[in-house]
């Protein structure tokens, strides 16, 4: 009686044998797991997940093992910030979220006008986009948002689950959440800068908040860029959204756009230690 086989990516399995065989009938000689793992560690991670793990059961076992992804994290320098919080059964997710760490704020440098932002207050002559009056430390920054003589505020609400951060990962591991914002006054006019960042639950109720006092600049200043930075840690379970709000105004009540400038806003999930 001919044994049944199930083809997978050019390889098939015998239902009566754990050893994989090619669709051509040629047997595949299983490799020791430690050798196979070493081979996988030298392949691109996406290739391991999308190709290797589909070849046969033995390869899938290695590609899905926590030890493999833990070793991959070690070799590439993705170390736990808090050794007491081990991402049990989630080392692969920890690896990819650490490797693909990114700014979750959309359009942080005003390159796409106001796309991605919700305008809360549009006072005075309203928000405007201009070129920086003083060069930013990041040469990629070519534009900034500018406030007017009455309150101008805008916000983004980041859905962490849509960005790939599962509720179980956020609750169990509680990775630090870093926020950053750059702001600058105009040299010939006083101005005020405001920022508020909130961690929200699934109903968008506030769990934690960073809301420092208003920052004021006098008239006749050096109009240099300043950075606001804060890291949320040990915030507990339940975080599903991040609400980022900032803005300001001028203090002279001058028509036009003499208020605070903002750009290069950032919200990052930081599972691993900074290298």
Image: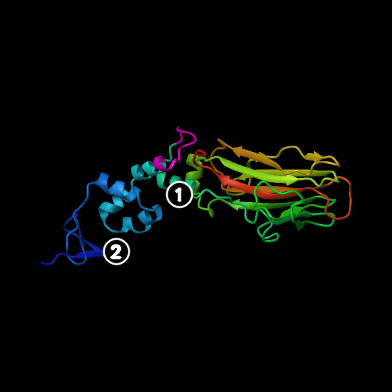
> How far across and how far down the image is residue 216, in percent?
80, 40
Alpha-carbon neighbours of circle 1 within 10 Å: few (<14), some, or many (≥20)?
A: some
Point out which mark residue 248 bears: none
- Is 86 left, or right, of 31 in this rendering? right
Q: Which residue is the extreme one toward the top?
A: 84
Residues at marks 2 and 1, CA–CA distance in whole angstroms:
24 Å
Mark 1 — residue?
96
Query: In this view of the protein, can residue 90 be seen by the observer?
Result: no
Magenta stretch, main secondary structure, is loop
Range shown magenta: 74-85
> At 43% from the left edge and 37% from the top edge, which residue is drawn?
86
> How far across and how far down the image is residue 241, in percent?
59, 48
Q: Nearer the viewer, residue 219 or 246?
A: 219
- Is 129 left, or right, of 161 in this rendering? right
Q: Is residue 66 above or below residue 18?
A: above
Q: Quadrant of residue 28?
A: bottom left
- Provide the secondary structure element on which disc 1 rests: helix
Mark 2 — residue?
9
Q: Nearer the viewer, residue 80 or 130?
A: 130
- Is 236 left, or right, of 78 in this rendering? right
**In the rendered view of the protein, which quadrant contains the N terminus?**
bottom left
Q: Quadrant of residue 180?
A: top right
> At 55% from the left edge and 38% from the top edge, which residue is drawn?
236
Question: Magenta stretch: residue 161 in it?
Answer: no
């Amino acid at each position: 009686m001919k044994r049944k086989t199930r083809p997978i990516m050019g390889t098939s399995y015998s239902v009566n044998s754990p050893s994989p065989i090619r669709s051509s009938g040629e047997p595949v000689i299983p490799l020791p797991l430690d050798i196979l793992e070493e081979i996988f560690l030298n392949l691109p991670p996406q290739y391991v997940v999308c190709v290797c793990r589909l070849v046969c059961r033995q390869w899938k076992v290695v590609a899905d093992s926590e030890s493999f992804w833990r070793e991959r994290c070690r070799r590439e320098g993705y170390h736990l910030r808090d050794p007491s919080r081990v991402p049990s059964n989630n080392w692969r997710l920890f690896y990819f979220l650490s490797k693909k760490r990114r700014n979750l704020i959309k359009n942080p440098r005003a390159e796409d006008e106001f796309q991605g932002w919700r305008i809360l207050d549009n006072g005075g002559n309203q928000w405007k986009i201009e070129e920086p009056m003083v060069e930013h430390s990041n040469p990629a920054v070519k534009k900034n948002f500018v406030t007017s003589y009455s309150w101008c505020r805008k916000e983004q609400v980041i859905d962490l689950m849509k960005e790939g951060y599962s509720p179980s990962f956020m609750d169990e591991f509680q990775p630090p959440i870093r926020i950053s914002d750059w702001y600058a006054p105009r040299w010939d006019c006083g101005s005020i800068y405001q920022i508020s960042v909130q961690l929200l639950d699934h109903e968008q109720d506030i769990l934690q908040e960073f809301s420092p006092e208003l920052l004021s600049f006098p008239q006749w200043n050096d109009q240099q860029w300043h950075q606001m930075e804060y890291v949320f840690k040990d915030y507990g379970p339940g975080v599903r959204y991040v609400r980022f709000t900032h803005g300001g105004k001028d203090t002279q009540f001058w028509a036009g756009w003499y208020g605070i400038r903002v750009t290069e806003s950032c919200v990052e999930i930081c599972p691993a230690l900074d290298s």
